[in-house]
Image (cartoon, helix red, strand yellow):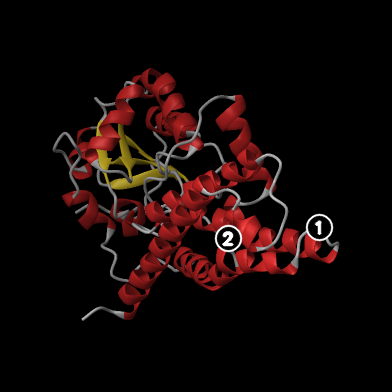
Amino acid sequence: MATPNTASKNRNSVSLKIAGIYNLIFGTGVILFPNLLFDLCNIPQPRYPEIWQCVGMIVGVYGIGYLIAAQNPSRHWPIILVGLLGKLFGPVGFLYSAVNGVLPWSFGILIFFNDLIWWLPFGKLLAETFRESNLGESPEDKEFHQVVATAQSFQGRTMTELSWRQPTLVIFLRHFGCTFCRETLHMLAKQRDQIEKLGLSIAIVHMSDTHEGNNLLERYDLRCVEVFSDPSCEIYRACRIGRATYRDIFNLKSLGKSFSTAFLRRYGVGKIAGDVFRLAGAAVIHQGKIIGDTKPKIPSDRLDFLHLAKQHSLKKNSGIPFLEFPNLEIS
């Protein structure tokens, strides 16, 4: 028997599939019969029907997006958000035109089927995603020592083995579509030699599957470091790597840095592949303990893992005792 949460997700997927099919049918109809709606509403046919056909193409493309989002609404919430914004602004434009006599009120039938009836399901989808993003971590999450003693890297080693072999700098990445993740990988590739000369090995934890992770890391010449695939974010949670909120992502600072990093610095963006709210982080693990870490508070904060590695090196060479976290011991 399906749980209430599962049943709700199934209904959400069905709503998106219906929206996707509707958009594809409507878009195809507008492309094939651009004058039909104007004739039904007794409106003069447009002088350039090709413009209206372009609108049909855009609506159809949205339909493809909705069908993709239906596979995992929580992951693909940006598609739903953009769709809802269009369905909010469309009626505003129609109302202005109808009041000023530019469009007849009969044209509102299009607004009803294209926009108004989707407010509730799309709004509900986004609200549920928002609630999920602000939930605390599961009380059943495994302890740190359990996770790092069992989770294996692509090379077949655990963090327990690595931490006793030599100090290990563990880099926790954001999802691969994030422009800041790509910046982090580029910086790591450039600073890798410096970090290893400080006496640390490097391990990377990401949220994608092993194949996708290896393909991306190969582009940055990082496949030969220890790589952990963690789609369920079990290692992230065990190492207390937190999650952002909507406010952390959609603020002027983050949006400005996103644009600058993606387009001006040309790191680009990609598809969402993992928990879009999960933050990045870095930790140095040595002899069974986390001896230092750095955790950005928002996605746009740069991950300064080289500084963390240098701090560890200074402690090691000066004889200063390492900072230990008694609750994060590896058994």
**Residue 171, located in which quarter of the rendered image?**
top left
Q: Toward the viewer: 232 or 160? A: 232
Above or below: residue 193 compared with residue 115: above
Q: Which residue is mark 1?
A: 102
Above or below: residue 203 compared with residue 150: above
Q: Residue at x 42, y 68 (%)?
A: 15
Q: Secondary structure at mark 1?
A: loop
Which amino acid does the dot numbered 2 rest on? Leu
Q: Residue at x 49, y 46 (%)?
A: 32
Q: Toward the viewer: 149 or 32? A: 32
- Image position of 41 (left or right of 282): right
| Res. 240 in view | no
Image coordinates of residue 11 in percent, x first then y, are 37, 72
Badge nearest the viewer, 1 or 2: 1
Residues at discs 1 and 2 in contact (Cβ within 8 Å): no
**Residue 18, located in which quarter of the rendered image?**
bottom left
Which amino acid does the dot numbered 1 rest on? Val
Q: Which residue is mark 2?
A: 84
Q: Residue at x 70, y 61 (%)?
A: 42
Image coordinates of residue 147 in percent, x first then y, are 23, 54
